[in-house]
Amino acid sequence: MEKLWAKDVDHLQAKKKEKVQHVPQMTAEEMSEDSSNRTVNVRLNAIMWNSVFREHQRLHPNCNGFLQWNMEREEKFGFVNREEAMCDKCTYRSRKFKLYEEVQNQKPGRKAAKINVSAQAALSQTPLGYTGLRKIVLGCNMPAPSTSGLQKRANKVLPEIPATQVVYSVAEAETEDKSIIGVVCKNKLCSVHPIKSGEKCTSACSSNLTFMKSIGDEYTWAKEALQDLASDGIEAKHLTTDPDSSAYRAADDLYLENTTSTEPEHFLDTRHFLNNHRKTSRMIKNWEK
């Protein structure tokens, strides 16, 4: 009886060791991540778990363990992630699943997630910055994208995120002082009223430009600045601008509209002209190669 009892004890201890060996020990960081939130595509999430359930049942038919994400093996890309499933009783580990849709293109390498591109496109149309966006995401108990990662993806969506403020200035070149004689200031931000298209702001509002208006409309700002000068009796005869500037077109339109009586003459800024000429020369050399 003693030998049989000893064998039973050894058998139970061996089973206990095997069970302890198979159960993964989660760290404090993994437990914290396990209670956080994620952004997933509903259809791809359903595909993942249906595949995981079937594969786990086929490989370990007698296991009744709990299937969950393996947070230690999680891969994050901005607002999306790739996940791997694991069992808390057996050694089952699934392959990694993409829980996000990708932007289809012909470029080599990993494709961008649609939600990352959409988030950057929406961010460019709002006054919210990277810091504010990260605070909102972290407040929802979700991993926030890094500031550098947001900027890198923003450069792929737009070469430069449009600003919310612009200052357009006109300087004279007749004196040695080169004084600024005209300034146009535009601002889309308002600390009092919400920014909504079609909503009129009161005198307490700091915004003097609708949010749907392009901040880079140089033609409009130049025209407004030249109109202000004309109202003070100052008209420009010679305009020196960049080769791609719209200021001369604005001055010419004012003359054709009889707002001003002086026909403008256009001169190109030599520094910008040389830079453009240098770029064109380099492009021609590359084409010849």
Image (tube, rainbow, N blue to C red):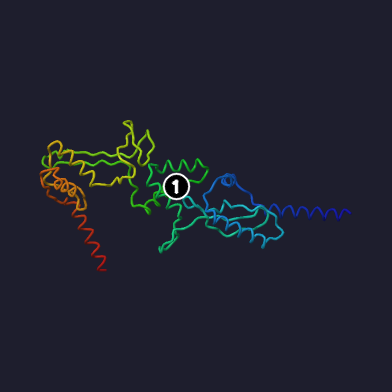
Seen from the viewer's position, the closer of residues 27 and 157 is: 157
Asked whether 207 or 138 is in front, the reply is: 207
- 127 on left or right of 254: right
Determine the image quadrant of residue 85. bottom right
Q: Which residue is mark 1?
A: 146
- Going by the picture, which residue comes out furthest to the right? 1
The quadrant of the picture occupied by the C terminus is bottom left
Q: Residue 97's image quarter?
A: bottom right
Pointer 1 local density, CA inside 10 Å: few below 14, some 14–19, many at least 20: some
Q: Position of residue 24 (x, y in %)?
A: 64, 52
Determine the secondary structure under disc 1: loop
Quick one: 10 or 200, which is closer to the camera? 200
Q: In the rendered image of this protein, does residue 246 appear above or below residue 203? A: below
Q: Identify which residue is drawn at 58% across, 56% down.
A: 46
Q: Nearer the viewer, residue 119 or 24?
A: 119
Q: Position of residue 121 (x, y in %)?
A: 39, 50
Identify whether 27 is placed above or below 111: above
List the single residue furthest toward the top. 204
In which quadrant is the N terminus drawn? bottom right
Query: Which residue type does callout 1 highlight?
Result: Ser
The residue most toward the bottom is 289
Expressed as whole percent of the image width and height from the top left, the position of residue 48 reads 58, 57
In the visual, does 236 lie left or right of 210?
A: left
